[in-house]
Amino acid sequence: MKNIDSLKNQKCEKIVISDSLSKFQRIVTRQERRFLMSPCAHISLGLKLIGNMSIEKLRKSVNKMLRTYPLFGVRIELDNNVLYSTTENATGVPIKIYRRKSDWTWLEVLNKEHSIPVKPSIGPLTRIILVKNSNISELFIFCHHTICDGRSLELALREILLNLRNPNRIPPSMTEIPPQTPDIFPLGVSKNQFTSWFIERINNKWQKEKILFDEEDLVNIYESFWKNSSYCVELITLNKVDTKRFVDICRANDVTVNSALLIAFVKARWEVYKPYKGKVKIATAVDTRNRLRIEIGDAAGLYAGGIIYKFKYIKDRPFWDNVREYHKVVKKTLNDNNVFNPIYNQFLLDPSLSDAMLFAIIGNQVQPHQSRYNKIFEFANSHDSLVEKYLKKMSNNISDVMSTNLGRLNIPDEIDGIKIDSAFFTPSSGLKLEIVLGIATAGGRLTISLNYHNGYFDGNNIKKIRDSAEIILKNILK
């Protein structure tokens, strides 16, 4: 992770787009709601571009994208105890332009943008970021996880690129699509009865000591969290030849790229750091768009689920044998019930309890000069609380490794004389989840990002894991 000192004296140019937003409103689901009060819930997708990007053309292209996907221009409003995302009175979507000083300026910029407090009731929940010089640029869409998933970022960038390629293009209108709720889950999906009973019991207990956190609390947490931690990314990028070869090798072994990469990082962590205790808990994010009961096409929003599988990694077993074994069992696990059951649980849990768990983890970082110091600090240090007991119980279910693989992005290879070189997908990082991978392919190049907060994980260990994983991949490609 590079130091952000080089940005201290750099003022970014900002263009705010507010006149193109279509009228849009829809309910915020409990699945989306659980990210709302987090200071570390932004996700981003970026493209490295070779060529000179016109800021004026970009402005017009983003303007058109917002007509297709007004969700990226919303704020969050509370109305009669129900949360809505709405474009009404929303702050405009900014395009922020930074001067590119090095190949790592984009990461310095992301770290700076992560640390800027966001009030959901005002916004913006989305920012377009351009890091540019005359020959090379990085273009990012940076968005709060409450309103989108990784695939949504790809859809928005694709619209921007298509608009850049054809300035006369009429932006398509999207049919109004409902958010992901149990009403549109696949037929046959059912919630776990024991889990439902347990969560209801926790909710009832929570009512006796319930405490609510608001936007001022959130701003306090934002300020204290980012003073104590930085957003860090370690990258592995394969060139076009190695990307194709790696895909071909995975196919020859009857496994997916995702399975191979996950086991490569499990192996790397095992070898350079220390063995896992027992089985490795591996989580995989799943795009649910093609699994829902209704057709939603290229809708933007949080249409995602996931699975966690406890895998017995055997160190002395050949690498591809471990990958094939993992792939075989996880393929069977990827059924609708397993993908949607965790989402059911998110709908059952009292949202204020989700907020409280996060504040219990990071609330002790607040400082006496902050407006909500007494409230937050006292709560975070209440060791006999229900939240503290629930966190201890849930700690055994935290994954060791997680991946979100967007695959080969459905975007043009070149637009207006500008070539797409590669992509960087940087999902939000966990505070207790050690290895968080964001994977995307663009310009024929596969890029893996290893994302973490250095206030919670030792950066030297993460770098060693990254270096070891790269060696593993190079040995595969020999």
Image: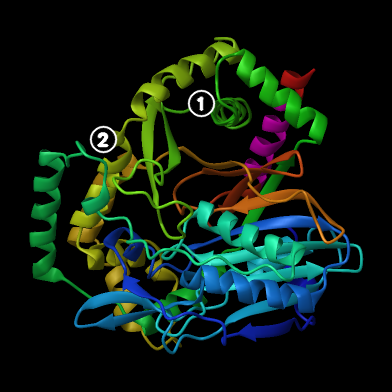
Q: Nearer the viewer, residue 401 or 419?
A: 419
The residue indicated by pointer 1 is: 275
Q: Taken as a whole, is the magenta stretch helix, strand or loop?
A: helix
78 relative to 153, above or below: below
Q: Earlier in the sequence, mark 2 or mark 1?
A: 1
Q: Tag on residue 16? A: none
Residue 462 lies within the magenta run: yes
Q: x%, y% of residue 424?
A: 67, 51
For image coordinates 51% across by 68% down, the residue present is 69
The kind of residue tagged 1 is Pro
For image coordinates 54% across by 74% down, the residue present is 67
In the figure, is residue 346 to the left or right of 59?
left
The residue indicated by pointer 2 is: 337
| Secondary structure of residue under mark 1 | loop
Q: Nearer the viewer, residue 8 or 244?
A: 244
Quadrant of the rendered structure where residue 156 is? bottom right
Residue 316 lies within the magenta run: no
Which stretch did the figure color magenta? 460-473
In the figure, is residue 216 to the left or right of 453?
left
For image coordinates 46% across by 20% down, the residue present is 326
Colour scheme employed for the rendering of this structure: rainbow
Q: Badge 1: how crowded within 10 Å, few (<14), some, or many (20+)?
A: some
In the rendered structure, are the residues bearing label 2 and label 1 in contact, judged by CB atoms less than 8 Å apart? no
Q: x%, y% of residue 206?
A: 13, 64
In the figure, is residue 222 to the left or right of 309?
right
Quadrant of the rendered structure where residue 131 is? bottom right
In the rendered image, is residue 384 in sight? Answer: no
